[in-house]
Amino acid sequence: MKKILLILALTLSVSAVNAWNNIPDEAIMLVASKNLTKEGKELVTKYLGDSYADDVCYIAGLEKTKKSPFSKEVHNLHFDKNLKPAKVDGDDALAAIEKALEVVRARKSHTDAEVTKALRIVIDLMCDIHIISNVRIEGVAHSQSDFSFQWYDGDAGKRKTLSNIKWSKMWVGYPQWHNGFSPQLWCEDLEYSLGSKREEFAKGSLNDWIAQIGDNASKFYARINPEYVMTRRERNELEDVNCEMMARAAYRLAALFNELAK
């Protein structure tokens, strides 16, 4: 029994390194599906069907079976010191997304299996690039590693307590703390709280979205570092930022699929 629990714990810790998890990622795809055009819906349904549980976290699933053709860097966005996308040696999320999009656009020249795989890669990495801790910026040393810092952890009588938290764990932890949320409930929550901003979030091209993500991440890296102590207020405010990034991923996925279907 202990061995089973240990394996489960290790599995969960690995899946949390670079991504949210299947539940919030599936919720993102559910939100996206609600914002598809008729043509976009036909495209997605043809290759993915009506259920998306097997489509999200696709690369992470391959990694668990050690069958991923990518390195771990594929989950990350890389920028140079001027916040321009940097094509690094090895894998990069933007490069992988662009390559997958090429397959979908030229789908008449590819097998259905190849197109399905490409769409799954797009879904997985579009979720990943909206996680702030997956952004790497040249010249910002602590953006290159999973650093730890202190944040508010609760109250012990009159004394406020602090604990160490890893940068990536904070961002992927926010949705995982809502254990009672199903993908459907996450979907409803995101639509209710941020649906009015769907056009704002989806406006522009993939390159515009990448630029927004890089700019957003650079502002956090400018003030949060290994010596930082995060207050309770900021901890709560950043949970709202995390939900906003989930919504951006959802509405941008819908915009991508609608464009691909034209």
Image (spheres, rainbow, N blue to C red):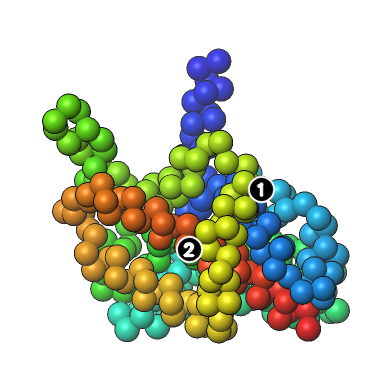
- Quadrant of image for the C terminus: bottom right
Q: Nearer the viewer, residue 93 or 193?
A: 193
Q: Quadrant of residue 221?
A: bottom left
- Could you classify mark 2 by the number of other residues whose Cα lies within 10 Å: few (under 14), some (14-19), or many (20 or more)? some
Extreme residue in the top direction: 1
Observer able to see residue 78: yes
- Quadrant of image for the N terminus: top right
**Residue at (53%, 29%) from the top-left corner?**
7
Q: Nearer the viewer, residue 88 or 129?
A: 129
Q: Quadrant of residue 132?
A: bottom left
**Residue at (51%, 50%) from the top-left corner?**
20
Q: Are marks 1 and 2 in contact (CB under 8 Å)?
A: no
Tag 2 residue: 245
Residue type beneath disc 1? Gln
Tag 1 residue: 184
Q: Position of residue 4 (x, y in %)?
A: 56, 22
Q: Nearer the viewer, residue 139 or 119?
A: 119
Secondary element type, mark 1: helix
**Residue at (62%, 46%) from the top-left corner?**
185
Q: Considering only order in the chain, which callout, 2 or 1, is on the residue closer to the N terminus?
A: 1
Left or right: 83 in relation to 155: right
Residue type beneath disc 2? Met
**Vertical position of residue 170 compared to residue 31: above or below:** above
Q: Position of residue 154 (x, y in %)?
A: 25, 35
- In the image, which disc is placed on residue 55? none
Q: CA distance from mark 1 to mark 2?
A: 18 Å
